[in-house]
Amino acid sequence: MSTPAITAESITMAYGSFVVMNDLNFKINPGSICVIMGGSGCGKSTLLKHLIGLKEPAAGEIFYGKESFTKADRETRSNFLRKIGVTYQSGALFSSLTLAENVAVPLQKELNLKPKKVRDIASYKLALVGLAGFEDFYPAEISGGMRKRAALARAIALDPDLLFFDEPSAGLDPLSSARLDELILQLRESLGTTVVIVTHELESIFAIADHCLYLDVDEKTLTAQGSPKDLVENPPNDRVYKFLTRNGQSRT
Amino acid sequence: MSAAGKTAASPATADVSCDSGTCRVVCAGDWKLGETPDVPQFPHTSHGNKITYDVSRVTSWDSSLAVFLLTLAGEARDTGAIIDTDALPKDLQHLLALALAVPEKETGRDDLPKKSFVTRTGESVLDFLDTTKAAITFFGQLMISSVCLFRGRIPFRMREFYLLIQETGVGALTIVGLVATLTGLILAFVGSVQLKQFGAEVYVADLVGISMAREMGSLMTAIIMAGRSGAAFAAHIGSMKANEEIDALTTLGIEPHGHLVLPRVIALTLMMPLLSLYATFLGIIGGGVISNATLGISWSQYIVEMQTVVNITEISIGVGKAFVFAVLVAVSGCFSGMRSGTDAAAVGRATTDAVVNSIVLIVVADSIFAVVFSILGI
């Protein structure tokens, strides 16, 4: 059995003395697409921030492969971060840079390439997300959905092993959302990327997720995990069933 | 991505060979971002040929191979060649198909004609006129909001107002005090060197007193407040605009000028004259320290001499100027914020504009004051 790409061991997330989630234990297999889901305010985005090192767990440990990410020194952590790509809820593009320059930022930081090659890679990444020809546009000149796609182009600039998405479909039209799902699947198929997505877009969950983690806001812990199909067919509790079926009625 | 069964790492290579109507591009080695060969040129004889790829000797690849093949395809297309991608692995074919799925947008950015000097000058003039018109409109709306406020037709949120008073007043005491004291010290020090030559050291008190009361107290305070409160107003309102909070206020029927601009203008207008007085006082103290320490002028001498020149007229002039400067700083900051764009860079520009415009307006206003007071003989 292969080593999980990410392992969370007894993670507790807290803001000061306010505990958001307790005792989270899960594994994400390499090359899989894992969706973190749950009701509003349950701590999905907070968990994502813990996984990418923007927040430290109050207790517990996160492992990338076999190595601890939580206890890693600065240099090791920097090496881990080199292998991940993140797209944020708002896109978080640098507004003073063009789209090509945004995508070029990680390329210039990590690779010693001629400007022409950097530009070619940036153009390719933008083309992958359907933004061919928009290289010289500034973020303020394109729509919110396009900004999100450009942010994805920046996140995949270095062909990361792990890709994290915070609400990727929010603000996208159905076609763009479907295209993004297709792109995520393609990246996984072609490059073997492990994908972690925070979303509550059921359509996306059922279309692409291999594994789901359900964070329960009332229980303050992970109450269900498995494939979306398994969770619908054998839900561990009513809340998961209601969430995945968009049904206010309890399972009978 | 690595091809199965391959072993030792080898540099990425790409060769083009053309033979009897077919050009063959052979790629080999490990293809990694940052370690790829340059795109080879197709021979001229390849015009109209078929181009095939052979990547069977590629041991591992990532996006670099896709970028290479796409660039190559672009070059080949220019020669009118037909590209056959059937020999590529399915994964790679899918990535290329995905990249080509949406046709490149014809932005026409490269075709935009260069603007002549006359055009650019004309546009700058029109832009200036547009900004001036907007500034006048803004000031007019502010006046209307003021009238509405005094008639009780718009609500005034006292809690926010107190916070603004605190931020623009108490919050600025340290920096204003420090700068004013140092200004007084500098004035006294520079003045003493000159006055000493004529044995008129005692007039350092006159120099520091008149300078601080009439000019430097209000001017230095205004410049500090332009950089502090004016910039903060622009950044705060600009961020609110970027977050569509201004739109939300408008659609809720709340007039943004009355809600956001007016409290700031009033708060700064109330605080700046007081800060100016405070700055004048500390500047005079600073000058006294130097007079006492380097010129041997006693504190009583210094104060008595000061009283002969610094009277209520001088103080009133300083306070009056501070009042006008406060209006200029507050209005300029809020105006820049309200005119800000909706991205982070635009908020930054708005903040810069606020500070630069405030300082220019302060200096212009001070010059006008100097001329007017000279004509009036005060």
Image (tube, grey):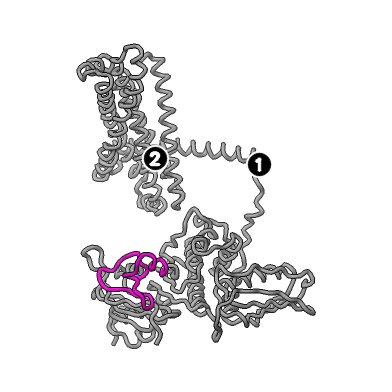
Can residue B156 be seen in this snapshot?
no
Quick one: A240 or A15, which is closer to the camera?
A15
Q: Is residue B310 left or right of residue B355?
A: left
- Residue A121, given in percent of the width and then of the height, sits at 57, 66
Q: Amino acid at mark 2?
A: Gly
Residue at 44% across / 32% down in the picture?
A: B360
Q: Quadrant of residue B30?
A: bottom right
Residue at 38% across / 84% down in the picture?
A: A227
Q: Which residue is mark 2?
A: B333
Q: Are both tags, 1 and 2, on one chain?
A: yes
Residue at 26% across / 17% down in the picture?
A: B306
Q: Residues within 10 Å of mark 1 (few under 14, many from 20)?
A: few
* Screen quadrant of the C terminus of chain A: bottom left
- Residue B203, given in percent of the width and then of the height, sits at 30, 15
The magenta stretch is A51-80
Quick one: A157 or B295, which is closer to the camera?
B295
Quick one: B134 or B106, which is closer to the camera?
B106
- Residue A139, given in percent of the width and then of the height, sits at 50, 57
Reply yes or no: does residue A52 show up in magenta: yes
Q: Is residue B362 left or right of residue A131?
A: left
- Residue B107, given in percent of the width and then of the height, sits at 62, 58
Chain under disc 1 = B
